[in-house]
Amino acid sequence: EKVVLKPYQTLAILVK
């Protein structure tokens, strides 16, 4: 899950 959270965090910032 941590591996998925890493790329997810970057996506969340981009969408933000």
Image (tube, helix red, strand yellow):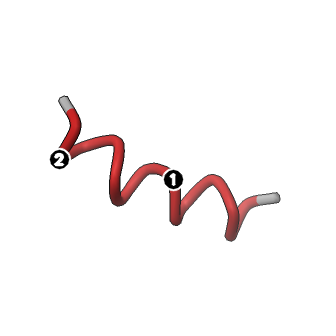
Q: Which numbered marker is on residue 1?
A: none
Mark 1 lies on residue? 9
Please give the name of the residue rendered at 51% of the width and 53% of the height, measured from the top-left corner: 9
Q: Is residue 5 left or right of residue 8?
A: left
Please give the count of numbered marks on the rendered protein.
Answer: 2
Farthest front residue?
2
Mark 2 lies on residue? 3
- Position of the C terminus, as image quadrant, is bottom right
- Position of the N terminus, as image quadrant, is top left
Give the image location of residue 2, x and y in percent: 22, 37
SS of the residue at dot 2? Answer: helix
Displayed quadrant of residue 13: bottom right
When the figure is inspected, residue 9 is found, relative to residue 10, above or below; the finding is above
User: What amino acid type is highlighted by mark number 2?
Assistant: Val
Give the image location of residue 11, x and y in percent: 54, 61
Marks 1 and 2, the one that precedes in the sequence: 2
Front in this rendered view, residue 11 or 5: 5
Please give the name of the residue rendered at 73% of the width and 61% of the height, measured from the top-left corner: 15
Please give the name of the residue rendered at 34% of the width and 54% of the height, measured from the top-left corner: 6
